[in-house]
Image: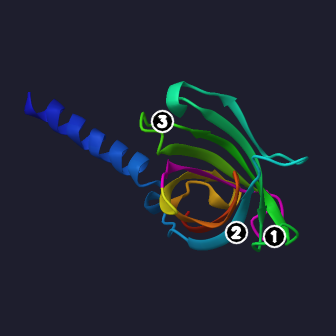
């Protein structure tokens, strides 16, 4: 009786090592990449709106905004465009103070062109931290964090600075 349990535990240990440690199981070291860019969140404008409210609820709770924001190398709107941030903000707090941010950063220029990063987390203060939960291309199997800071607010419009540390 003891032998089958022992072999089952050994098999389980091998599966956990293979699934949980993919990078190390094949002898790869994780690469660390630091990325900085600016996201232009345009809610109100005569043209070129990049953020649109699609639902709303009582006192803001349940409000969803879909985004397709420009990402630039510098703070200015006319600085080099690096890609887009597509996703949504969900007002997930009854107090109306918190937003759940879920977005895909799509790199369309520069050294990471053709790659993506998936980010998720709470957007509730001037400076906040959200998680890197995945990626594609150069960032396959990505994990890490992003520090976001509001650089400029113009009414409902804003420019956010992203400093991202990615392990991939």
- Find disc 2 in the rendering and name its residue: 37
Distance, label 2 to label 1, CA atoms, is 12 Å
Q: For the residue carrying disc 2, how many other residues have a C-alpha within 10 Å: few (<14), some (14-19), or many (20+)?
A: some
User: In screen coordinates, is 162 left or right of 98?
Assistant: right
- Find disc 3 in the rendering and name its residue: 92
* Residue range (magenta): 107-124
Q: For the residue carrying disc 1, how many other residues have a C-alpha within 10 Å: few (<14), some (14-19), or many (20+)?
A: few
Q: For the residue carrying disc 3, how many other residues have a C-alpha within 10 Å: few (<14), some (14-19), or many (20+)?
A: some
| Residue located 85% across and 71% down the image | 80
Distance, label 3 to label 2, CA atoms, is 26 Å
Sequence-wise first label, 1 or 3: 3
Sequence-wise first label, 3 or 2: 2
* Residue at disc 2, secondary structure: strand
Of labels 2 and 1, the one closer to you: 2
**Which of the 4 quarters of the picture holds residue 116?**
bottom right
| Residue located 34% across and 45% down the image | 16
Sequence-wise first label, 2 or 1: 2
User: In screen coordinates, is 147 left or right of 139?
Assistant: left
* Residue at disc 3, secondary structure: loop
- In this view, the residue in front, 167 or 150, is 150
Of labels 3 and 2, the one closer to you: 3
- Find disc 1 in the rendering and name its residue: 110
Mark 3 in CB contact with mark 2 (< 8 angstroms): no
- In this view, the residue in front, 45 or 91, is 45
| Residue located 39% across and 50% down the image | 20
x and y percent of residue 7 in the render?
Answer: 21, 37
x and y percent of residue 106 in the render?
Answer: 74, 53
Of labels 1 and 3, the one closer to you: 3
Vertical side of 114 occupied by 38: above or below:
below
**Is residue 61 in sight in this rendering?**
no
Distance, label 1 to label 3, CA atoms, is 35 Å
- In this view, the residue in front, 101 or 7, is 101
């Amino acid at each position: 009786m003891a032998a089958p349990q022992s072999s089952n535990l050994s098999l389980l240990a091998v599966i956990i090592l293979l699934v949980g440690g993919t990078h190390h199981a094949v002898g790869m070291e994780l690469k660390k990449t630091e990325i900085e860019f600016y996201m232009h969140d345009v809610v109100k404008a005569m043209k070129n709106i990049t953020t649109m409210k699609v639902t709303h609820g009582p006192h803001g709770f349940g409000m969803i905004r879909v985004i397709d924001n420009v990402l630039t190398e510098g703070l200015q709107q006319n600085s080099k465009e690096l890609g887009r941030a597509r996703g949504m903000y969900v007002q997930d707090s009854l107090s109306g103070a918190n937003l759940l941010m879920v977005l895909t950063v799509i790199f369309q220029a520069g050294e990471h062109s053709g790659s993506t990063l998936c980010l998720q987390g709470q957007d509730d203060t001037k400076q906040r931290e959200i998680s890197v939960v995945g990626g594609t291309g150069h960032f396959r199997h990505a994990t890490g964090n992003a520090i976001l800071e509001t650089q400029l607010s113009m009414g409902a419009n804003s420019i956010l600075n992203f400093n991202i540390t990615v392990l991939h």
